Amino acid sequence: MNNPTSSCTEASLPLNPMAQLWHAIAARWAAHLEETRKAREFDFTSDLSAETLRDIGAPEQMISNAAARREWQQQRLWDLRQWRGG
């Protein structure tokens, strides 16, 4: 039978094995990027300080991660300033 849905799907898939491989890699990469984007959107606490997290009653592990992240950011800025001679 002439089903337009199946012919469209079959026509969109490459027949060449190398093209199929690249298609699979591209699809996997797109899925990875989407997962990463969702993870960043969900991590709304990344910009909150440890004090703010403590005030809202966040778990201790989240507060500890926030403090470590802030310390890492400050150390990185200090290193960049030292590197630039400032």
Image (tube, grey):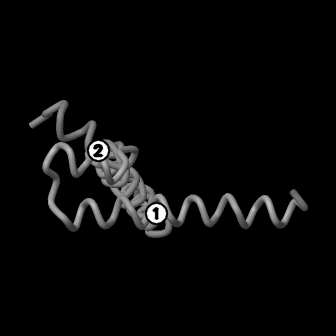
Q: Position of residue 31 (x, y in %)?
A: 33, 54
| Residue 2: mark | none
Which residue appears at 25% of the width and 49% of the height?
Answer: 53
Query: What residue is pinned by disc 2?
Result: 52
The quadrant of the image that shows the N terminus is top left
Query: What residue is pinned by disc 1?
Result: 16
Along the line of sight, the residue nearer the viewer: 64 or 44: 64
Name the residue furthest top.
4
Which residue appears at 20% of the width and 45% of the height?
Answer: 55
61 displayed left or right of 13: left
Q: Position of residue 17 (x, y in %)?
A: 44, 69
Along the line of sight, the residue nearer the viewer: 23 or 65: 65
Upstream in the sequence, badge 1 or badge 2? 1
Which residue appears at 31% of the width and 49% of the height?
Answer: 51
Q: Are marks 1 and 2 in contact (CB under 8 Å)?
A: no
The quadrant of the image that shows the C terminus is bottom right
Three-letter code, disc 2:
Thr
Which residue appears at 84% of the width and 66% of the height?
Answer: 83
Query: In terms of image quadrants, where is residue 6?
Result: top left
Three-letter code, disc 1:
Asn
